Amino acid sequence: MRRILSPSILAADFKVLGEQIETCEKNGAAYLHFDVMDGVFVHNISFGLPVLQSLKGATELTLDVHLMIMEPIRYIEEFAKAGADILTVHYEACENLQETLDAIHACGVKAGLVINPSTDVEALRPYLHQADMFLLMSVEPGSGGQAFIPQTFDKIRALRSMLEAQGLETDIEVDGGVCHANVKEVLDAGANVIVSGSTVFRGDIAENVAGYMKLFQEE
Ligand code: DX5
Ligand code: ZN
């Protein structure tokens, strides 16, 4: 399966966001992870539609939008119009998850489904054929720079086998605390889309992204 890096701009320097995104793109990133936080579903407030709108057409990267907001169904259309290529919603934040996934597909956008560290991977079973990507949080949502929760490895393995049992090759994205030191283990467990904020944007971005690309090549 294609191994994809999705740098999380939550960790970027917004004074020079355009340049930093370009550096990520030039060095091999294929997605851009866009963490929307509403201060209700998670304690933090990040950024939203105007920032996404400004990126649309300004980058070739796939805009991988992670909605950490209550009842995301209310905003699907606006985020789709603002340029999202993938809209990922939290299992824990949707009154009617099927309706929410359908609303994303109705806008012609890929639907991602994400669960928090404390949510069992079994919760995803009814939706294995409904989502275009599954996201497993490896930190509590709400901020970057946290440590990777090791129990996530078993969840990745369990989800990958649940998908394989259905003959599905759906992308599994992992988000939070991933770094050069643990990414091989995350990939070996069965994930293929890697979100990374602090490891990409702290220090030399070109080197950090190239470091992931090198690790992605290794068997
Ligand atoms: C946390 C966000 C993550 C975070 C990742 O709520 O969903 O995407 O920004 O940042 P790092 O890689 O620093 O943990
Ligand atoms: Zn995220």
Image (tube, helix red, strand yellow):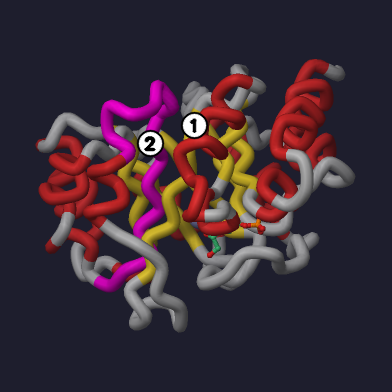
Between residues 29 and 195, which one lies in front from this camera angle?
A: 29
Q: Name the residue under label 2.
A: 63
157 up-or-down from 192: above or below: below
Q: Are dots 1 and 2 in contact, CB under 8 Å?
A: yes
The amino acid type, in three-letter code, at marker 1 is: Tyr
Which residue corresponds to the image point at 45% horizontal and 38% vertical from the top-left? 18
Q: Is residue 103 magenta?
A: no
218 up-or-down from 123: above or below: above
Q: Residue 130, position in %: x, y? A: 30, 38
Q: In this view, does 33 lie to the left or right of 109?
A: right
Decide if residue 29 is in sight here: yes
Q: Mark 1 points at which residue?
A: 31
Q: For the magenta stretch, what is the residue range?
A: 55-70
Q: Quadrant of the N terminus?
A: top right
Which residue corresponds to the image point at 53% horizontal and 66% vertical from the top-left? 116
Which residue corresponds to the image point at 19% horizontal and 63% vertical from the top-left? 96
N-term-proximal mark, 1 vs 2:
1
Decide if residue 91 is in sight here: no
Which residue corresponds to the image point at 49% horizontal and 22% vertical from the top-left? 167
Q: Does the magenta stretch include residue 62?
A: yes
206 up-or-down from 152: above or below: above
Disc 1 residue lies near ligand 2 with CB under 8 A: no
The amino acid type, in three-letter code, at marker 2 is: Leu
Distance (Cα) linking label 1 and label 2: 6 Å
Q: In which quarter of the image is the C terminus?
A: top right
